[in-house]
Amino acid sequence: MASARRKFGREFKVEAVRLIRAGRPLAQVARELDVRPEQLRLWRKRLEADGVFEATPRVESAEAEVRRLKRELEVVRQERDFLKKAAAFFAKGSA
């Protein structure tokens, strides 16, 4: 005779996903809660889709982040230089 399927409430699922998002390894949480890791992944995906949690951000490598920040800094410097020139132009025109 087959065993009955277990049913988990929404609160249980939310708390399980909260443990994963807090940095605990998924496999460890699965063992502790006696559920399959695939099930935890599915719960996380569904709860993020429902808006209970924000989607897990992708972690940038340090090098990629440095490149992105350098590009952003260059844009900000160009904007600053343009505003300096514009301020000088308008200050000269009103004198």
Image: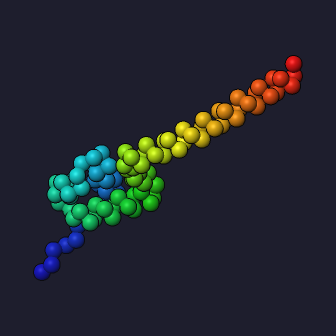
Residue 56 visible in the snapshot: yes
Front residue of 13/39: it is: 39
Tell me the residue at 76%/27% (across/down).
Answer: 87
State the image quarter where residue 34 is shown. Answer: bottom left
State the image quarter where residue 83 is shown. Answer: top right
Give the percent coordinates (x, y) of residue 88: 77, 25
Give the percent coordinates (x, y) of residue 37: 23, 62
Front residue of 48/66: it is: 66
Give the percent coordinates (x, y) of residue 29: 21, 54
Q: Which residue lies furthest to the bottom in this view?
A: 1
Quarter in which the C terminus is drawn: top right
Horizontal side, residue 4 vs residue 45: left or right: left
Quarter in which the N terminus is drawn: bottom left
Against 51, residue 88 (above or below) is: above
Tell me the residue at 60%/35% (across/down).
Answer: 77
Q: Which residue lies furthest to the left in this view?
A: 1
Give the percent coordinates (x, y) of residue 18: 32, 49
Residue 53 visible in the snapshot: no
Horizontal side, residue 5 vs residue 46: left or right: left
Horizontal side, residue 69 vs residue 9: left or right: right
How many numbered circles are shown? 0
Q: Which residue lies furthest to the top in this view?
A: 95
Tell me the residue at 39%/46% (across/down).
Answer: 63
